[in-house]
Image: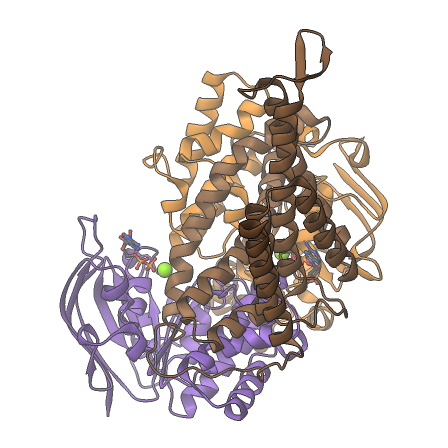
């Protein structure tokens, strides 16, 4: 079944937070490791992110995403560990290859940042109804068109995943082996990307028309079906995050 | 050709979509009818091996579907999907139709021949290089039919082939079904157009809420007014007309009715 | 009052060499239920989209002649302005889902929010539309988790809730079972009886004959005929235009049974029974 968002309904503190605060947290996760490049800081941030995911009880849902991310990071780590220019300190050899400390540390740095950012986004995506997020932003004055574009990001990933599934069915039913070992599966999977993207593009035009005739571009003031949600402590959380970023900056400059 | 015994299926636990289906499907061309959501598509996906039965068995030409991958089954059973956008994934009409035959190990020249023949049958032979996404919905549906016909399987299932078709399109599909029948293939079709059922299928199976509630000769099935009503299915228009006029005979086609009327007049 | 006036409308899609609409002219009164028929690619969808201004505003292309909706000339107004008066339901229900709403209920609200309808009124209208199309039981489902037929009902409900004075529907029942199509046609007929003007393109001729006040027959972008169903379906040249008359008409034609006192053949079951009855039995 197609479901357009990865939002997972749970009754937790994280779910009850203002979506804007979660955006602030993404900013935080993005900036802190840049301001304070030490790997220790990155690790702290990653742990923080994972704790939030656990508290929100959505950790299981992140596994497919993280597996994909790890797959990519693994190649980064291997390539950087083996071949990064400036590699000096040998960690160990295997066969003709040598693994170096500098490259490895660099790659770990990258890896932590990526994981950190991915978890911050996962917190937002998994615990916030896309409509709540956009509505908060639009009520804050964001144009409803930009709002829609943001939301379509939420929609595109699951829609593509489900069209992968349907296309896999289409291939299997016409004699292409898609079950079995990893190689068979990859061989079936890679050529899918083109058509899936093409298919979503073809849909985009029709969808744009459907939006038009539902008054999407109408000039008058908008109203909302849902009453404005009141979030507690939003201001405190948001100022807290900004303060955190400011402190990090100060630390970087002063210390 | 197909034996289904005590087949059940559910997408989510506790919410059965098919319940204890027993069917023996033979060479007769067969229509599957029933309300939206009755489980028709689910049923044919199980035959095709795209879904695995929850309970029960499906045998196709004495092969147990459970033990075969969908790709292996593709050599004997072809399915045209309900929604063409779910089926099409190539960038060219000809490539789309050749995909199946090539996968089955048919050599390129023979595959091209099969594909061209199938495309000609549905009237798309002059659009070989077009991108399928630029075709209209009815053309996409015909393309999907051609893609499966080109595989030359013994069993062919069509899921709502007449969606979006005009008069010409329906005639084309009729012709395809007729050709397949002449080649001794088993044609099964899920369909809501009862006049089309009456004209083209020898056997009709009625699904309702996950169960088969009626099965038999098309004429027999369309005579069962009360059961059809309980399955929210209507008889063909011509059958309704005959019935309203008080005839005991169940008419299936306009020609039948007109002949009958003319004979009556000559008496 | 003339609700819709189309005068010498000509239209060509960009990059296309052929006119999709060629000198189309007709007038529609308020509250009429108009059926549009014709073979595929004859221009039905293009005509439907010209009623809301998608042709030419969305596609661009070459446009000549006039479409006047309730006094507004479509060419001079934006789609947003026209969509206050005219709602359109497209053929493919899947691409009509906005993709920004989590439930069917919210999905139907989308257009109302854009129009700035008050909350209380919104809820009234959504409930009305849900009930009219019989999809209230699914209102908490995700729009993408509906079957094709249910999506089609939702697409219609989404437009009806916007309360347009004119509703245009492009093959709105293609994915529905016969009972579902019947329900949808009845719901639309109710609206038309309340004064809403309806334009509906479909291939189901028996339904068109039963429900429409007048039928517009298109072929190759031109209007072949625009008349009551009996007249259009009694034509001898329907086949040449890629259309098949309703079963009842075909039977009566073959038996040469016309409606009493007219030159036309029956087009509905009831009429056919009246004409053919008395003989058999
Ligand atoms: N992928 C799916 N996941 C969950 N439920 C499904 C899925 N596909 C179909 N269903 C449900 O199964 C039932 C039968 O669906 P289907 O076999 O498509 O019916 P039909 O083809 O007769 O219209 C419906 O209630 C439908 O909502
Ligand atoms: N988006 C488009 N771009 C170019 N040509 C189009 C487009 N849509 C339709 N056409 C052309 O316009 C003509 C009328 O098509 P259409 O209005 O879709 O007919 P119908 O709805 O009756 O099937 C056809 O020749 C078709 O090829
Ligand atoms: Mg189905
Ligand atoms: Mg059309």
Instruction: Left or right? Give the position of C119 relative to A6.
Output: left
Q: Residue at x 75, y 70 (%)?
A: A13
Note whether residue C56 is visible: yes
Q: Nearer the viewer, residue C245 or B150?
A: B150
**Residue C133 image point, x, y percent:** 56, 79
Q: Picture quarter containing residue A8?
A: bottom right
**Residue C63 image point, x, y percent:** 15, 63
Q: Is residue B90 above or below residue B192?
A: above
Instruction: Left or right? Give the position of A52 relative to C9.
Output: right
The brown chain is A
Give the quarter the ligand 3 occupies. bottom right
Q: Picture quarter containing residue B79?
A: top right
Image quarter (top left, top right, bottom left or bottom right) of the N terminus of chain C: bottom left
The orange chain is B
**Residue A245 image point, x, y percent:** 58, 59
- Which residue ends up furthest to the front in the rendered image? A254
Q: Nearer the viewer, residue B164 or A43?
A: A43
Q: Residue at x 39, y 72 (%)?
A: A216
Q: Nearer the viewer, residue C102 or B265?
A: C102
Note whether residue B154 is visible: no
Q: Residue at x 41, y 87 (%)?
A: C192
């Amino acid at each position: 079944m197609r479901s357009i968002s990865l939002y997972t309904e749970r009754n937790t503190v994280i779910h009850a937070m203002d979506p804007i605060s979660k955006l602030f947290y993404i900013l935080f996760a993005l900036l802190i490791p840049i301001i304070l490049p030490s790997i220790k800081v990155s690790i702290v941030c990653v742990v923080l992110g994972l704790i939030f995911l656990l508290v929100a009880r959505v950790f299981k849902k992140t596994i497919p995403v993280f597996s994909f991310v790890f797959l990519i990071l693994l190649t980064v780590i291997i390539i950087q560990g083996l071949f990064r220019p400036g590699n000096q300190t040998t960690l160990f050899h295997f066969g003709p290859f040598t693994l170096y400390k500098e490259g490895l540390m660099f790659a770990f740095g990258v890896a932590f940042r990526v994981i950190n950012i991915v978890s911050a986004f996962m917190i937002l995506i998994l615990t916030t109804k896309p409509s709540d997020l956009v509505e908060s932003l639009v009520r804050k004055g964001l144009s409803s068109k930009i709002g829609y574009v943001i939301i379509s990001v939420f929609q595109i990933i699951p829609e593509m995943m489900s069209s992968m599934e349907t296309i896999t069915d289409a291939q299997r039913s016409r004699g292409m082996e898609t079950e079995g070992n990893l190689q068979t599966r990859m061989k079936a999977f890679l050529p899918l990307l083109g058509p899936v993207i093409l298919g979503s593009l073809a849909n985009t035009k029709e969808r744009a028309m459907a939006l038009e005739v539902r008054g999407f571009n109408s000039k008058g003031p908008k109203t909302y079906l849902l009453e404005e949600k009141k979030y507690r402590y939003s201001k405190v959380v948001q100022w807290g995050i900004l303060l955190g970023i400011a402190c990090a900056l100060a630390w970087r400059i002063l210390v | 050709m197909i034996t289904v015994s005590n087949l059940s299926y559910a997408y989510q636990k506790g919410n059965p979509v098919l319940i204890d289906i027993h069917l023996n499907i033979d060479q007769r061309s067969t229509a599957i009818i029933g309300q939206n959501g009755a489980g028709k598509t689910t049923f044919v996906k199980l035959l095709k091996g795209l879904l695995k039965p929850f309970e029960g068995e499906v045998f196709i030409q004495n092969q147990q579907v459970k033990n075969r991958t969908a790709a292996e089954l593709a050599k004997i059973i072809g399915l045209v999907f309900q929604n063409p956008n779910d089926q099409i994934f190539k960038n060219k009409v000809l490539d789309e139709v050749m995909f199946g035959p090539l996968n089955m190990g048919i050599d390129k020249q023979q595959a091209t021949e099969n594909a061209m023949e199938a495309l000609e049958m549905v009237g798309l032979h002059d659009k070989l290089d077009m991108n399928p996404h630029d075709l209209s919905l009815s053309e996409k549906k015909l393309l999907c039919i051609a893609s499966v016909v080109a595989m030359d399987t013994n069993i062919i299932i069509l899921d709502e082939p007449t969606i979006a078709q005009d008069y010409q399109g329906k005639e084309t599909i009729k012709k395809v079904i007729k050709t397949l029948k002449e080649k001794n293939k088993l044609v099964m079709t899920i369909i809501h157009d009862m006049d089309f059922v009456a004209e083209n299928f020898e056997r009709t199976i009625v699904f309702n809420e996950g169960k088969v509630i009626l099965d038999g000769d098309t004429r027999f099935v369309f005579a069962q007014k009360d059961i059809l009503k309980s399955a929210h299915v209507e008889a063909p228009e011509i059958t309704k007309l005959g019935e309203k006029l008080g005839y005991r005979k169940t008419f299936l086609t306009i020609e039948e009715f007109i002949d009958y009327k003319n004979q009556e007049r000559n008496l | 009052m003339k609700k819709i006036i189309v005068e010498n409308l000509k239209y060509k899609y960009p990059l296309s060499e052929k006119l999709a609409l060629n000198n189309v002219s007709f007038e529609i009164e308020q509250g009429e239920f108009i059926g549009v028929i014709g073979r595929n690619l004859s221009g039905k969808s293009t005509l439907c989209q010209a009623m809301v201004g998608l042709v030419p505003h969305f596609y661009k292309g070459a446009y000549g002649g006039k479409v006047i909706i309730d006094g507004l000339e479509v060419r001079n107004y934006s789609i947003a302005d026209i969509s206050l008066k005219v709602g359109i339901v497209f053929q493919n229900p899947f691409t009509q889902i906005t993709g920004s709403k989590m439930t069917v209920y919210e999905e139907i609200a989308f257009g109302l929010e854009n129009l700035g309808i008050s909350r209380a009124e919104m809820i009234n209208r959504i409930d009305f539309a849900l009930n009219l199309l019989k999809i209230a039981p699914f209102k908490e489902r995700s729009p993408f988790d509906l079957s094709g037929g249910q999506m089609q009902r939702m697409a219609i409900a989404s437009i009806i809730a916007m309360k347009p004075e004119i509703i245009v529907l492009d093959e709105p029942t293609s994915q529905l079972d016969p009972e579902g199509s019947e329900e949808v046609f009845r719901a639309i007929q109710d609206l038309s009886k309340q004064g809403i003007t309806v334009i509906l393109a479909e291939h189901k001729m028996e339904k068109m004959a039963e429900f429409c006040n007048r039928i517009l027959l298109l072929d190759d972008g031109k209007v072949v005929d625009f008349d009551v169903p009996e007249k259009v379906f009694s034509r001898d040249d329907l086949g040449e235009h890629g259309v098949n008359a309703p079963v009842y008409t075909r039977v009566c034609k073959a038996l040469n049974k016309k409606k009493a006192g007219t030159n036309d053949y029956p087009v509905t079951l009831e009429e056919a029974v009246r004409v053919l009855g008395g003989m058999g039995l």
